[in-house]
Image (spheres, grey):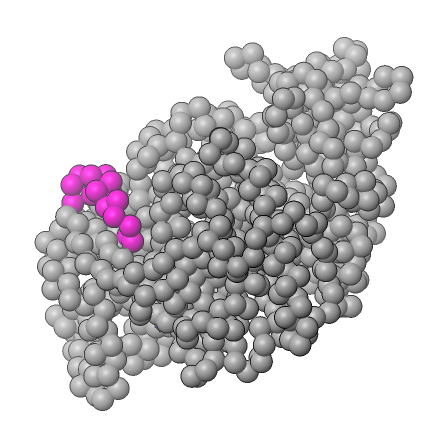
């Protein structure tokens, strides 16, 4: 022990010498001057003092003031200064992969080191850390996983949780776990960092801990809303019809003409939208479902138009465009680049900033371009708070946000773009005023802004809790409802009970709320349980390829487009893909066709002809790869497998897998003379959504439909359905117990008895019992 201590001491001394040498070198000195200009630097002593005197400290300050890059570094430097360099261990969590990597790299540069020396990072499937790494950046998910095997975070001296204001599910969850851990580890320091000023909420959660406020600075930013943007163009609204020029070749020369045409197009689209949507009169739900901002037509046109105007005649400065997600960003980028829409390509630096970008692009985002070159960054809401680009002067804000495909894997079941909150809109605007007064163009009218919610609801209150419940069980944190009652803002009891009930019905938890084998596998897959179930069974039954497409398809915006004026054509196009009474299989066929067509100009023409969204197709393609790598992690499939495309599987096998995943989403098909009707146990009569391929059928040769989603408008509508047989439901539905708790007949036995002839039902149930016994053996 004495020898080890001596070694550590020697290493600490060495680290201190190295740190001093760097700070005294000319490069180090220059770097230090840069750092000293950040507002956070001026609070260095106050911050370090607060940390040394309190177990928990909250630090809040404007985005870009230096919290993420400086504060972990202050702690590290001070530990090294006091000869604790070799014994300290600082962990800083980030909600996103990409900021984890870019921040750790930045700090290594500021310290004059290579990444992986004292500063490192770890994200899923990737990392850079060495024996000497003392400051580790990781995603919240990684720290949660570490807690699985290291409940007390032994040897860790500081935990920093960054961006807590975002209130992601994982972050809220981590805070409960850490709060419980603090009494067991009195010497552990917890630092919470937040951009917005709701710091008191967090402070009181931890019993009134101190808050260090970093004063900020920004220049004024002028806001333009949609109506002002149009006025700026000098064009009056006309009711001209929209002109489709999708895919049409355009060159820089014909741009003038293009702008003129576009302006009237935009104007009419906007007018239509404004007329049809006086947002003040709608509830948030209705607003959500309106396709007011459709990136395929109006949003894109407006962004293109604004970019053109800015590149043409505005003062210098970078442009930051907030878009909804990776798929939108990449298609706009392709579109702008393909035809040199923004003029001389040497004078424009077009970059994308989203979860799956390459690291070369990452660096360029922060760099100042050469004089005369305009930097344009197309970003997701990630650039709202976690990444700061200093030279931005113009911001274009589409008003919506969607979780990126990475977040999709992180339990987010719904990937539809949704309106942002007022706080987010202000945050986006603020990004334009870092270096000089700026301008912000909001692509929605002022009345829409006024109708935005003040804050976004924390994720824990707005998303299904099933995955979270599984995680609580995996971490052995006791009773689910008791644990969740300790959250910063607890979800409703009913929501928690529903989630637990659902997990029991699908067989992930047993009656006593313990994880089953299936449950354990599901916790290894960070996707919704129903998708996880399909991936698992698809792997076991060796029909993974089409199942990957089905699962990816359920995670993105509906790839089958249905423009109002061409509804019939669109439905006919979808019908070509359907042969098996299944929306899921129709998607698989559409995707496989796209995969073949992709080689010709990215498959745009194919999509155009078949009313498919090219963005969704691309998103499905990349999600498939993500899901495959997740499955390799669990060991369910061979790590060497590569994706190949083939529709050569047993159709019944696929029905079985889809049924296994979507159960208990089932309805029975009641045939009458000319057509059929549908019934579920909870709702009675239900209807099919009009864009289901099954809605055009008069006869479905199966007795059941499994569905992905139920939407209640006036009646209950089913979306995304697949027809299945008795035997498939019997074998791949849930457990056969009737599960008659408080009047709910949710389990399979209940379904069969409810909908079948009693003697048939009994026969089936006996058969299933025998099979279950056989499997037990
Ligand atoms: P905060 O966390 O308070 O929002 P950051 O610490 O992320 O602020 O950023 C502080 C400053 O460091 C910003 O001005 C930002 O532009 C700069 N910065 C951050 N990351 C990089 C990087 N990878 N390269 C260059 N500059 C960066
Ligand atoms: Mg930050």
Can you tell which quarter of the image residue 730 is in?
A: top right
Per the rendered image, the range of residues in magenta is 194-209
Can you tell which quarter of the image residue 99 is in?
A: bottom left
Measured along the vertical axis of the image, is residue 670 above or below residue 223? above
Q: Nearer the viewer, residue 198 or 509?
A: 198
Quadrant into which the C terminus falls: top right
Measured along the vertical axis of the image, is residue 284 above or below residue 86? above
Residue 258: image x %, image y %?
66, 66
Q: Residue at x 73, y 28 (%)?
A: 688
Residue 127: image x %, image y %?
44, 67
Q: Is residue 183 magenta?
A: no
Q: Is 578 on the left-hand or right-hand side of 382? A: right
Measured along the vertical axis of the image, is residue 749 above or below residue 29? above
Q: Is 90 on the left-hand or right-hand side of 604? A: left
Furthest toward the right, the residue is 673
Residue 228: image x %, image y %?
46, 53
Measured along the vertical axis of the image, is residue 191 above or below residue 350? above
Q: Nearer the viewer, residue 261 or 80?
A: 261
Residue 391: image x %, image y %?
37, 71
Q: Residue at x 11, y 64 (%)?
A: 45
Q: Residue at x 70, y 49 (%)?
A: 241
Can you tell which quarter of the image residue 17 is in?
A: bottom left
Q: Is residue 204 magenta?
A: yes
Q: Residue at x 29, y 53 (%)?
A: 195
């Amino acid at each position: 022990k004495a020898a080890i201590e001596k070694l550590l001491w020697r290493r600490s001394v060495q680290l201190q010498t190295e740190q001093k040498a760097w700070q005294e070198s000319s490069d180090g000195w220059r770097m230090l001057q840069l750092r000293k200009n950040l507002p956070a630097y001026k609070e260095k002593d106050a911050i370090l003092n607060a940390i040394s005197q309190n177990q928990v400290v909250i630090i809040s300050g404007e985005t870009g003031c230096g919290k993420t890059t400086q504060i972990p570094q202050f702690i590290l430097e001070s530990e090294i200064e006091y000869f604790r360099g070799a014994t300290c261990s600082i962990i800083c969590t980030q909600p996103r992969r990409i900021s984890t990597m870019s921040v750790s790299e930045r700090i290594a540069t500021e310290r004059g080191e290579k990444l992986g020396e004292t500063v490192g990072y770890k994200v899923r499937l990737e990392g850079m850390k060495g024996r000497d790494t003392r400051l580790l950046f990781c995603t919240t998910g990684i720290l949660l996983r570490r807690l699985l095997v290291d409940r007390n975070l032994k040897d860790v001296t500081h935990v920093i949780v960054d961006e807590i204001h975002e209130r992601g599910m994982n972050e809220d969850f981590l805070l409960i776990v850490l709060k419980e851990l603090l009494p067991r580890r009195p010497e552990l320091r917890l630092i919470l960092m937040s951009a917005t000023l709701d710091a008191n909420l967090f402070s009181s959660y931890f019993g009134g801990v101190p808050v260090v406020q970093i004063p900020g600075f920004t220049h004024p930013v002028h806001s333009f809303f949609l109506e002002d943007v149009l006025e700026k163009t000098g064009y009056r609204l006309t009711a001209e019809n929209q002109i489709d020029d999708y895919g049409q070749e355009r060159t820089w020369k014909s741009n003038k003409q293009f702008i003129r045409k576009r302006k009237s197009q935009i104007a009419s689209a906007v007018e239509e939208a404004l007329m049809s949507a006086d947002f003040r009169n709608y509830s948030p739900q209705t607003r959500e479902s309106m396709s007011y901002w459709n990136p395929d037509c109006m949003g894109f046109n407006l962004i293109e138009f604004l970019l053109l105007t800015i590149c043409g005649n505005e003062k210098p400065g970078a442009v930051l465009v907030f878009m909804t997600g990776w798929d939108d960003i990449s298609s706009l980028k392709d579109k702008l680049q393909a035809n040199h829409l923004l003029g001389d390509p040497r004078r424009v630096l077009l970059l994308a900033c989203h979860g799956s970008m390459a690291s070369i692009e990452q660096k360029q985002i922060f760099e100042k371009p050469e004089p005369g070159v305009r930097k344009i960054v197309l970003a997701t809401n990630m650039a709202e708070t976690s990444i700061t680009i200093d030279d931005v002067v113009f911001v274009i804000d589409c008003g919506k946000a969607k979780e990126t495909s990475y977040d999709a894997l992180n339990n987010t079941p719904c990937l539809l773009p949704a309106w942002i909150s007022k706080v987010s809109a202000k945050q986006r605007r603020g990004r334009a005023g870092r270096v000089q007064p700026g301008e912000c163009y909001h692509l929605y009218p002022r009345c829409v802004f006024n109708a935005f919610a003040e804050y976004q609801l924390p994720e824990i209150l707005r998303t299904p809790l099933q995955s979270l419940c599984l995680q609580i069980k995996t971490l052995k944190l006791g009773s689910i409802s008791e644990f969740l009652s300790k959250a910063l803002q607890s979800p409703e009891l009913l929501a928690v009970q529903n989630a637990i009930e659902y997990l029991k019905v699908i067989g992930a938890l047993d009656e006593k709320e313990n994880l089953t084998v299936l449950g354990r596998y599901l916790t290894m897959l960070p996707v919704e349980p129903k998708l996880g179930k399909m991936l698992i069974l698809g792997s076991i039954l060796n029909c993974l390829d089409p199942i990957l497409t089905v699962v990816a398809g359920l995670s993105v915006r509906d790839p089958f487009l249905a423009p109002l004026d061409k509804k019939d054509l669109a439905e006919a196009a979808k019908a070509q893909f359907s042969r098996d009474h299944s929306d899921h299989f129709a998607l698989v066929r559409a995707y496989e066709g796209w995969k073949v067509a992709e080689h010709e100009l990215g498959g745009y023409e194919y999509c155009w002809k078949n009313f498919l969204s090219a963005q969704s197709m691309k998103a499905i393609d990349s999600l498939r790869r993500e899901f495959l790598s997740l499955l390799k992690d669990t060991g369910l499939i061979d790590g060497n497998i590569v994706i190949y495309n083939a529709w050569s599987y047993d159709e019944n096998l696929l029905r079985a897998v889809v049924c296994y995943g979507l159960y208990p989403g089932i309805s029975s098909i009641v045939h009458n003379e000319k057509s059929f009707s549908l019934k579920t146990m909870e709702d009675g009569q239900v209807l099919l959504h009009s864009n289901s391929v099954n809605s055009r059928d008069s006869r479905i040769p199966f007795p059941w439909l499994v569905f992905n989603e139920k939407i209640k408008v006036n009646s209950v509508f089913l979306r995304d359905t697949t027809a299945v047989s008795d035997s498939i439901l019997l074998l791949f539905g849930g457990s056969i117990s009737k599960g008659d708790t408080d009047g709910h007949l949710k389990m399979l036995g209940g379904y069969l008895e409810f909908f079948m002839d009693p003697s048939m039902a009994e026969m089936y149930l006996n058969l299933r019992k025998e099979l279950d016994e056989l499997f037990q053996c």
